[in-house]
Amino acid sequence: MQLPTADTTPQNPASESAGQEMDLSVRVRQIDPTLDLIEEIKRLKHELNAVILAHYYQDDEIQDLADHVGDSLALAQAAANTDADVIVFCGVHFMAETAKIINPDKPVLLPDLDAGCSLADRCPADLYGEWLKQYPNHTVINYINSSAAVKALSDIIVTSSNAVDIVKQLPADQPIVFGPDRHLGRWVEGQTGKKMVLWNGFCIVHEQFNARRLAALKAEYPAAQIIAHPECEEAVLAQADFIGSTLALLKYVQTHTEQKQFIVATEVGILHQMKRARPDAEFLCSPPNSGCNCASCPYMRLNTIEKLYLCMRDRHPEIVMDEATRLRALLPVQRMLEMSQHLAPVQQKGD
Ligand code: SF4
């Protein structure tokens, strides 16, 4: 079966209708400009007994408001452990869906339902299910960057923080299918020595780093260390001094205090926490293919302070999914949480 070829045009099957999106932009414009949104969000958080979870790729001001800031694994763990009545998820759709899979009785709010993900969007469940039929005896491992319907087709969910560790826990002779990120899959193969069947997906943010321009930047800053996310292309990873999940990159910066310059090949939002952790260090963005000198995820950036305020004020948009899909998707998510209990403790704000 021919793998679908991923293109680079943003799409989002999770999107509500254009009319509703228009409604959101109108509602944003109608916010009273004299309101102190930060204070309003804090008040609403108290009123709703809500917890705000924010991914590292969110805008700085959203990270600063959140109760927990972390990568996909840390936020899934935070969602599993929260005793709040309402979960406000400042990340992308699949992350909020994961929180809902774990917490069916709690409202999970996402500031903008159009905050999708190129990886998740290019792995539709119907095509993926057909493709999997070729590999009946394989363990299906899926990156958390996938829809609930794709998670429901999986045996184990992984994140970039725990993928290597979880694959190593499987029997050496167990055949594995890995989706949807081909670069992460290839990197996991290299780290574990296990050959896997890979789905042909990629992240539009991480695949845009340009290996030739990265080499030129390194020549300009020879003392800098290159740190890269495993969703990057092989030619970029080949130049890296350290490869790891967003959390692992942050920890690397925190612990390598002798190092004063870093070239960072991942989404630019993580620089907020890196600069907080290492005000003495200089951070350079790995150059993407475009003229711009930073890599920003267009999906993550759909969430704004204004939309965060509106979703808490109106308790909308809320993640909904059918119960059969949720129950089927819960099994591989629970398996991930069980297999990674010893990894990546939840990062509280200010950690
Ligand atoms: S950075 Fe890439 S993988 Fe992460 S949400 Fe954006 S498109 Fe998806």
Image (cartoon, rainbow, N blue to C red):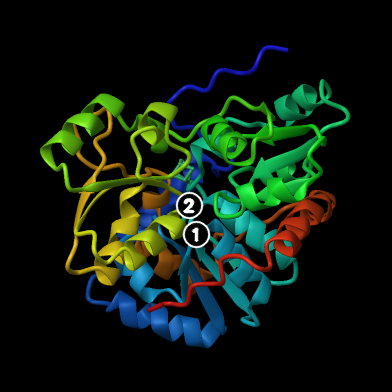
For mark 2, give the secondary structure. loop
Is 303 on the left or on the right of 196, as rendered? left
Q: Residue at x 27, y 33 (%)?
A: 288
Judging depth in this view, the residue of 216 and 5 nearest the camera is 216
Q: Amino acid at mark 1?
A: Asp
Q: Is residue 101 above or below residue 227?
A: below
Is disc 1 surrounded by few (<14), some (14 to 19) or many (20+) residues within 10 Å? Answer: many
Mark earlier in primary sequence (2, 1): 1
The residue nearer to you, when weighing 18 against 260, is 260
Q: Which residue is mark 2?
A: 245
Residue at left offset 44%, top offset 54%: 246
User: In the image as oriented, which residue stretches furthest toward the left?
Assistant: 220
Taking the spot 72% from the left edge, 28% from the top edge, the residue there is 128
Q: Residues within 10 Å of mark 2 (few under 14, many from 20)?
A: many
Question: In the picture, which quadrant includes the C terminus?
Answer: bottom left
Question: Which SS class for mark 1?
Answer: loop
Q: Nearer the viewer, mark 2 or mark 1?
A: 2
Question: How far across and down, in percent of the image, does residue 70 sit?
Answer: 47, 65
Residue at disc 1, CB closer than 8 Å to ligand 1: no
| Quadrant for the N terminus in the image | top right
Q: Quadrant of residue 31?
A: bottom left
Q: Nearer the viewer, residue 265 or 102?
A: 265
**Residue 12 seen in the figure:** no
Where does the image place residue 282, in percent across and percent down from the top left?
Answer: 17, 57
Residue 71 badge: 1
Tell me how far mark 2 sits from mark 1, CA to CA.
8 Å
Q: Residue furthest right?
A: 137
> In the rendering, at what x and y percent does residue 26 appear?
36, 54
The spot of residue 340 in percent (x, y) is 68, 62
